[in-house]
Image (tube, rainbow, N blue to C red):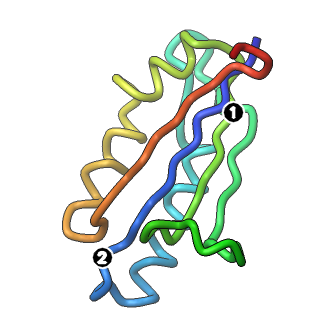
Amino acid sequence: MSVTHTVLIQFNSGVKTEDVNATCGRFIALKDSCIHPTNDAPYILSLKGGKDNSPEGLQNGITHGFVVEFASTEDRDYYVKIDPSHQAFIRSLGGLVDKVIVVDFITGQF
């Protein structure tokens, strides 16, 4: 079963728009730059994201959301713990974000 990895980001208020856009672009690019260690091919099934536009007012400071889909928990775990491209992306967030919330789930498992 596939695993959905949801990432919600609150960028620091002083971060320039071009830096936010560059960071979001680097996140989206992980779809192609994260390579599976056993077959040397990209392994993220889908990755999408964008700036919050909800009219509900329940964001609690969150400004951007991303949804990453993996074929398995093993792929997700490799991405989160080991993948060099993802680890480099995490390091690049220093000073740019105030808060990150991550929620993972398997559809239908409650």
Quadrant of the image containing the N terminus: top right
Left or right of 105, for residue 63: left
> In this figure, what is the number of numbered marks?
2
Return the x and y of residue 31 as percentages of the image width and height: 63, 44
Q: Which mark is residue 78?
A: none
Q: Which residue is mark 1?
A: 69
Q: Residue at x 21, y 61 (%)?
A: 94
Residue 72, above or below 65: above
Return the x and y of residue 63 as percentages of the image width and height: 50, 71
Amino acid residing under circle 2: Asn
Tag 1 secondary structure: strand
Badge 1: few (under 14), some or many (20 or more) residues near its Cα, within 10 Å?
many
Q: Are marks 1 and 2 in contact (CB under 8 Å)?
A: no
Q: Residue at x 58, y 54 (%)?
A: 29
Badge 2: few (under 14), some or many (20 or more) residues near its Cα, within 10 Å?
some
Q: Residue at x 69, y 16 (%)?
A: 110
Q: Residue furthest left?
A: 95
Residue 84, above or below 99: above
Tag 2 secondary structure: loop
**Distance between the alpha carbons at the discs numbered 1 and 2:** 26 Å
| Foreground of the two, 55 or 106 | 55
Q: Which residue is mark 2?
A: 12
| Foreground of the two, 101 or 66 | 101
Q: Residue at x 28, y 65 (%)?
A: 98
Left or right of 33, for residue 18: left
Sequence order check: which comes first, mark 1 or mark 2? 2
For residue 53, which quarter of the picture? bottom right
Return the x and y of residue 12 as percentages of the image width and height: 30, 76
Return the x and y of residue 8 as percentages of the image width and height: 50, 54
Amino acid residing under circle 1: Glu
Indicate which label's residue lies in the foreground, 1 or 2. 2
Left or right of 25, for residue 83: left
